[in-house]
Amino acid sequence: MNAAEHIAYWQTLAESDLEVARRFLQRGENLHYCLFFGHMSLEKLLKGLIVARTHEMPPKIHDLLRLADKATLPLEKDVEERLKIFNSFNLEARYPVEEVYKWIKDQFPRTSS
């Protein structure tokens, strides 16, 4: 893919994730999913902006502030605070689950080769 195709890819995914977040919000249920998909939409939009501004592949990270920095995006204080809120929800929700998942997965018997 060329840069324009990468940018369009990230924008399309971002819009799709935002639409999922909107649907959860409209139903007023599973609001944690609303926040999760909201975060994902911002993450993907920032990754598209990184490609647009740097012509490089975005890093495989979820931290919105680091992504904004990589995109050389000057953040207003209120936007920075909102990104911090999204980050705190996403990081707290994502990583403890992955740690517990890995621990449980490690409990399976090892197969010998």
Image (tube, grey):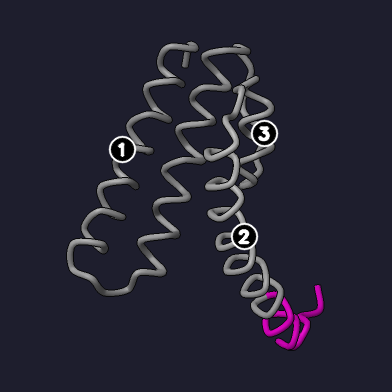
CA separation, marks 3 and 2? 19 Å
Name the residue at the front extreme: 77
Circle 2: residue type? Ser
Name the residue at the right extreme: 112
Of the pair 23 and 5, the residue shown nearer to us = 23
- For discs 2 and 1, the disc positioned in front in the rendered view: 2
Residue 59: image location, x then y, percent: 67, 34
Residue that label 2 marks = 88
Going from the N terminus, do you reach mark 2 or mark 1 first? 1
Direction from residue 94 to residue 29 in the image, left or right = left
Answer with the quarter of the image where residue 99 lies. Answer: bottom right
- For discs 3 and 1, the disc positioned in front in the rendered view: 1
Instruction: Name which residue lies at 32% across and 46% down.
Output: 18
Residue that label 1 marks = 15
Instruction: Name which residue lies at 47% across and 37% down.
Output: 44
Q: Residue 76 lies in magenta, yes or no?
A: no
The numbered mark at residue 59 is 3
CA separation, marks 2 and 1? 22 Å
